[in-house]
């Protein structure tokens, strides 16, 4: 049984929710076991980083290349390693630990739940898990994270009348089959994903479990779905001028909600004829990966404590707005999103982990930069981020950066004759080329364009 469980973990890659840690030091071609205090500190650092973020699994006794070398320490040292999260962290982290055996090799597995407090190691430093790294947090971010931790209780609430039977067996079984985890589903959801309380008999799901896998999630949250509204024109009108042409409400367990919403919304994303590489081609109004990334982020990170509002997707002639209940959790800011920095923090870590393992969320902290890249790749204006009341709004515009006339002019030259680079890295002018300064258009990328002498720019 242990071999199958270890094999399942080794098929996965290190990331937000999984880390491998060697119990050996490798120097100058020789290997020796790490001193127990050093290994205990490493365990405590990784466990605390995962607890401060979204939780996860740490497997000790595995090399970076996934070769299994085990733990060669004595029994007393092993016990010290097991108790490291309790002994070396403040406040202590109660990580579920388990000894696993693969042949004659011993490994340690730690299952870490997201903590409700910010944990620190000896010396006072706090760490945070971001993708495969565990960086130390600066003091101002620690304080912001403490404030954010106060708002993560909602998904952990345990409704008194909730029972395992309120979960959809088929959706749970599909999720477990996707993971290829040999453990029983009740154990998997309780111990690994912390979606159930199994301390008193049959596991009872918490709100995160009910929203993800519930037979009727609206029984636990009246507005946990997505409302799609399509308008005729560039703005909303009311009364006699009401311009709603389509309205769809999607209500489903979160494990299915994204697929159902994407499947229907994409039917309304228009194709338009645009000039590309000297040819007119059919292109979608919005890159699929950009608007779907925004929708997935809304489902994963909205504030579910706001029970009176759904995620809203508004489609106008010139733009798509994805509106998510709840403003950004600290320490995230709108300015950081606008600068498309790689940042990750979860308001709903239990929900986030399930959606990530289902493949909806990929590299943590990379979703926003990827949206910018996709919009730029398709020649469209960059995403816009704003706060309207208690909604975080992501706006994607279908307006190209350059008009058709400009694109025709640019495409008359071979690639070797046109060089685009970011402003500030000007190329050296040549005898056959002259330089045109970047346009100072707010919100647009600035380009350096080289074109042959003897031709004129269209601007």
Image: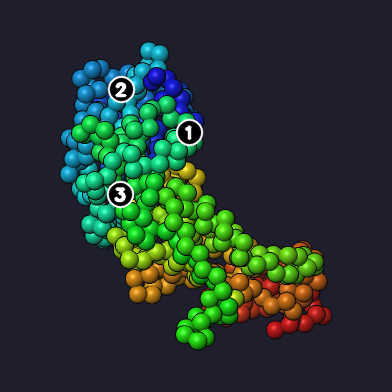
Residue 444 in the image: state x and y as whole percent: 57, 74
The residue pinned by badge 1 equals 177
Q: Is residue 313 visible?
A: yes
Name the element at disc 3: helix
Q: Marks 3 and 1: CB-CB under 8 Å?
A: no
Name the element at disc 2: strand
Q: Is residue 343 above or below residue 282?
A: above
Q: Earlier in the sequence, mark 3 or mark 1?
A: 1
Farthest top residue in view: 104
The residue pinned by badge 3 equals 207
Label 2 to label 1, Cα distance in Å?
24 Å
Q: Is residue 118 left or right of residue 61?
A: left
Residue 206 in the image: state x and y as whole percent: 28, 45
Q: Residue at x 34, y 60 (%)?
A: 222
State which mark lies toward you, 2 or 1: 1
Residue 381 in the image: state x and y as whole percent: 58, 71
The residue pinned by badge 2 equals 99
Q: Is residue 27 visible?
A: no
Residue 196 in the image: state x and y as whole percent: 29, 40
Q: Locate the N terminus and report the quarter of the image it occupies.
A: top left
State which mark lies toward you, 2 or 3: 3
Label 3 to label 1, Cα distance in Å?
22 Å
Q: Earlier in the sequence, mark 2 or mark 3?
A: 2
Q: Is residue 421 left or right of residue 95?
A: right
Q: Residue at x 36, y 55 (%)?
A: 218
User: In front: 93, or 152?
Assistant: 152
User: In front: 77, or 429?
Assistant: 77
Q: Residue at x 77, y 76 (%)?
A: 409
């Amino acid at each position: 049984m242990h071999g199958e469980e270890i094999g399942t973990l080794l098929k996965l890659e290190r990331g937000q929710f999984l880390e491998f840690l060697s119990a050996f030091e490798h120097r100058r071609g020789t290997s020796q076991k790490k001193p127990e205090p050093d290994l205990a500190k490493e365990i405590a650092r990784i466990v605390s980083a995962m607890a401060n973020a979204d939780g996860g699994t740490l497997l000790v006794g595995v090399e970076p290349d996934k070769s299994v070398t085990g733990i060669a320490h004595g029994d007393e040292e092993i016990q010290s390693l097991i108790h490291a999260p309790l002994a070396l962290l403040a406040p202590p982290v109660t990580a579920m630990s388990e000894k696993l055996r693969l042949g004659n090799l011993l490994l340690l597995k730690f299952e870490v739940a997201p903590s409700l407090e910010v944990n620190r190691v000896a010396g006072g430093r706090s760490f945070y898990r971001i993708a495969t790294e565990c960086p130390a947090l600066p003091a101002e971010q620690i304080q912001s994270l403490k404030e954010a931790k106060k708002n993560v209780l909602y998904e952990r609430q345990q409704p008194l009348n909730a029972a395992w039977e309120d979960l959809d067996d088929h959706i749970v079984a599909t999720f477990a089959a996707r993971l290829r985890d040999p453990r029983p589903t009740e154990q998997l959801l309780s111990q690994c994903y912390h979606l159930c309380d199994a301390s008193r008999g049959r596991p009872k799901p918490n709100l995160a479990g009910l929203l993800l896998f519930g037979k009727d999630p609206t029984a636990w949250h009246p507005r946990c779905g997505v409302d799609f509204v399509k308008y005729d024109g560039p703005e909303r009108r009311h009364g006699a001028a009401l311009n709603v042409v389509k309205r769809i409400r999607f209500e489903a367990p979160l494990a299915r909600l994204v697929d159902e919403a994407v499947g229907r919304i994409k039917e309304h994303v228009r194709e338009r004829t645009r000039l590309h590489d000297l040819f007119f081609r059919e292109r979608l109004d919005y890159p699929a990966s950009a608007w779907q990334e925004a929708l997935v982020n809304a489902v994963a990170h909205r504030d579910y404590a706001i029970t009176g509002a759904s995620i809203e997707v508004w489609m106008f002639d010139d733009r798509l707005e994805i509106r998510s209940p709840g403003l950004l959790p600290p320490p995230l800011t709108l300015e950081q999103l606008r600068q498309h920095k790689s940042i990750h923090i979860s308001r709903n870590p239990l929900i986030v982990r399930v959606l990530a393992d289902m493949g909806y969320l990929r590299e943590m902290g990379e979703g926003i930069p990827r949206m910018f890249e996709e919009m730029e790749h398709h020649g469209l204006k960059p995403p816009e981020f704003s706060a309207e009341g208690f909604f975080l709004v992501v706006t994607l515009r279908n307006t190209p950066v350059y008009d058709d006339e400009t694109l025709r002019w640019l495409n008359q030259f071979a690639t070797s004759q046109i060089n685009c680079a970011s402003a500030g890295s000007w190329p050296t002018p040549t005898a056959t080329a002259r330089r045109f300064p970047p346009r100072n258009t707010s919100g647009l990328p600035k380009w350096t364009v080289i074109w042959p002498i003897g031709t004129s720019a269209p601007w």
